[in-house]
Image (cartoon, coloured by chain):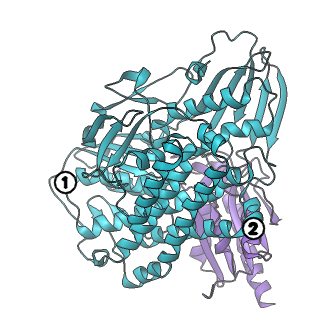
Amino acid sequence: MSPAALETARNKDGLRRVVIEPLSRVEGHGKVTLLMDEDGHVQQARLHIVEFRAFEKFIQGRPYWEVPVMVQRLCGICPVSHHLAASKALDQVVGAKQLTPTAEKIRRLMHYGQILQSHALHFFHLSSPDLLFGFDSDVARRNIVGVAAAYPDVALQGVLLRKYGQEVIRHTAGKRIHGTGSVPGGVNKNLTVAERDELLRDIYQIVGWSRDAVRLVRQLFEASLEEYRAFGSFRAHTLSLVRADGALDLYHGGLRARDADNRRIFDHVDYSRYWDQISEEVKDWSYMKFPFLRSLGPEDGWYRVGPLTRVTRCDFIPTPLADRERREFLAFDEGRAALATLGFHWARMIEMLHAAEAIKDLLHDDDLLGRELMATGERQARGVGVIEAPRGTLIHHYRVYENDQVARANLIVSTTHNNQAMNRAIREVARRYLDGRTLTEGLLNHIEVAVRAFDPCLSCATHAMGKMPLSVQLVDADGTLVDTLVRG
Amino acid sequence: MTEQRAPVLVLAVGNPSRGDDALGPLLAEMVETAALPGVEVLTEFQLQVENSLDIEGRERVIFVDAGVGTHAPFEVREATPAADFLHTSHALSPEAVLATYLQIKGESPPPATILCVRGESFELGEGLSPDAAAHLQAAWPKLASLCAAGVAETRA
């Protein structure tokens, strides 16, 4: 049975149900349900993510100038992405068609800091335990402390890379969290010489560690090539921003969609009317919508976003070390690593290297110290901002009343774009690893490894103590609880 | 790390826009307003690996967070390093922050206390629930006394 067919079982009578809820080390509420027959064959596999839609209500009625700050409270993991996407949308509302050089470069610096810290966190803290120890290794060891004990240099670099990214954010946004640096029409602070020099002090080390991280992922691929090549992999259309010359650009660009063979679907499309290209489908079994490319329809038009898409679908990366690594990645294993779901990790580290190089270049640009911070223009009623957030394309869309209150908000986050792609990945893993086998924690972790490769992140569930235990429940066909495994 | 750090760090956790999750940040604001000598305050949405570097050079760390199903109005306990990772998502527990410190620094972390204030509702855009507001008022004197005791330890 193909992974695509596993979306809905033909006959649910007599099937037993396995629930993995919530997914550990995945932000927000998520669970996976598997329906298995008496022989242990997987008949249905679904990833359910409880998309939080109340954020639109949270924003409506607020003065538009508050929005870039308040949207940071939607997500504790990538607040800067929301901060910048909202600012870009509201640039249009205040008529700022062209930011000042200082404003654009400060925002870019902030964004690269976010990419650096987010990618470092994901790889070193969330994924490296699986990759370094094995997907079904001792669960007690499969965490950052286990990594620190076995690979102390790797763990320390992960922490310091993350810390450096946070410092970039602090200097550009004003604070580590709840920053206020980016505002509609520009920024409200430049970089001081002291701040620039402080960041310059460590940037060459950061570039070096980022390069080492790319090599570490390559070594992991080389060590487990057969498994990595096939793990949760599938063919997919892709969507990303690219610069006008086709370069990777995580802050701004036009929309590019390619098919699974990298052939053009559309290119350099102005995102201010994204709805001409993208629509969303509702399925009765999921709270989260399923976006698709309008030209291909809901059945075939689903697509994948994020680091793997961006690195493999751009024409080049505009920093030399990252571009060299991109070319090696594309050539590795006759191009198959670039198609693999676990290729996300390699691509993510290439982007981290690019972010480090871009930070280095910006820190040598005196525009960061400039005093022209704001641009204005003719007031508009609507604005759309799109940015490549760490996990993929992020869309903010606002309509604003004449009295400055937000009338309507629509946000499409990267995890929503990847909804169908993540479902494909878990079905492929379920078919390959779980089908016909006795389920163990290690085998179920394979499902989580596939989901974690995408690094899904929702507007956060609260982290409060005791809020998120992980339980795996095995329930038989008549709903009786057969077994429970609780972690944490 | 050569910079001089305040001996007591209050590390408050929570999202101010998620109902009772604001308990941590609100208590952090109260400490800041009180301007307690020898006490530094940091607020985070959630604890992360780099917080292991924030606790370096401290004599006492006080983690302040909202709790679900914990004792009302609050509970206080000492925290020790533990690889306690799997019940959370992207976030770390205070024990895991201490364990990360132990591993990457190769030395015991500073002594740490957890002040966990019970919350009831955590929805986006909500204010503090009435119960949580009462818990906040009950917790503030305790937090102030923990800070004072931490500073006194330093001087002893």
**SS label for mark 2:** helix
**Can residue A70 be seen in the rendering of this structure?**
no
* B114 with respect to A167 (left or right): right
Please name the residue that numbered disc 1 is placed on: A95
Q: Amino acid at mark 1?
A: Gly
Nearer the observer, A29 or A276: A276
- Disc ID at residue B98: 2
Which tint is chain A? cyan
Q: Is residue A193 above or below residue A266?
A: below
Q: Give the residue displayed 46% in from the left and 48% down from the top.
A: A330
User: Where, by quadrant of the figure, is residue A271 drawn?
Assistant: top left
Residue A429 position in % (x across, y down)? 65, 32
- Disc ID at residue A135: none
Label 1, label 2: how many angstroms apart (C-alpha)? 48 Å
Q: Is residue A335 above or below residue A175?
A: above
**Can residue A138 be seen in the rendering of this structure?**
yes
Which chain comes out purple in the rendered image?
Answer: B
Nearer the observer, B123 or A412: A412
Residue A180 position in % (x across, y down)? 40, 64
Please identify the residue farthest to the bottom as the structure is shown: B155
Q: Amino acid at mark 2?
A: Leu
Please identify the residue farthest to the front as the structure is shown: A334
Q: Nearer the viewer, mark 1 or mark 2?
A: 2
**SS label for mark 1:** loop
